[in-house]
Image: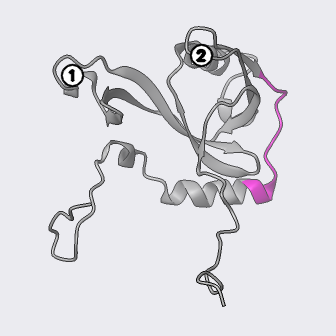
Amino acid sequence: MGLLDDIEISASSESSYMKFEKGENRFRLLNTPTLGYIYWEGNNPIKIAKANEAADGAEPKLFWSCVVWNNGRPRILEITQSTIQKALKAYDQNEDWGNLTQYDVIVKKDGEGKEATTYTVMACPHAPMSKEDKAVADDFLKTYDPKEIFETKSQKDSDGDELPF
């Protein structure tokens, strides 16, 4: 008998977060984005609600955090690229396209490396979500708290004391 014979392996390794992969990335916004700022302390990203909350010398960058429908499920997408933010806002404010929850969007990522990467944003024809997908999305949104992205998470024991890991 092996050491791991009775250990189960998770059936799903798919993340609750979406990130832009090379090629086409299709999604639909499900909520109004929460705006925040991100900066780095070493290898650690620090997310704050207002730019003036950043540490001295830090250069915070605006990001949008939103729930999207992607690959048949709700996921959280953080958009830091201003070219994508501007294009999404333009579609949302356009009289013919309007509210981004009413149609899918494709963000095409080309190139590699920070300087050579480009993004193209394309709207898909208006189409309603299926009743089943809408119900799953609504259930997710009921439990989603966008303010949690700004909370620092630390592990504490039952007495509320910081744990050393």
> Based on the displayed image, in which of its 4 quarters is residue 61 positioned?
top left
Indicate the position of residue 96 as horizontal and vertical percent values. Answer: 76, 17
Few, some or many residues within 10 Å of mark 2 (<14, 14–19, 20+): few
Which residue appears at 71% of the width and 36% of the height?
A: 27
How far separated are the C-alphas under marks 1 and 2? 29 Å
Question: Does 79 appear above or below 6?
Answer: above
Q: Which mark is residue 61?
A: none
Which residue appears at 27% of the width and 62% of the height?
A: 155
Frontmost residue, 140 versus 109: 109
Which residue is under mark 1? 52
Name the element at disc 2. Answer: loop
Q: Is residue 30 left or right of residue 110?
A: left
For the residue marked with disc 1, what is the amino acid?
Asn
Q: Give the residues in magenta.
A: 123-133
Indicate the position of residue 58 as horizontal and vertical percent values. Answer: 25, 19
Indicate the position of residue 60 as horizontal and vertical percent values. Answer: 32, 21
Name the element at disc 1. Answer: helix
Few, some or many residues within 10 Å of mark 1 (<14, 14–19, 20+): few
> Based on the displayed image, in which of its 4 quarters is residue 43 positioned?
top left
Indicate the position of residue 165 as horizontal and vertical percent values. Answer: 27, 60
Hey, which residue is sitting farthest front in the picture? 1
For the residue marked with disc 2, what is the amino acid?
Gly
Which residue is under mark 2? 113
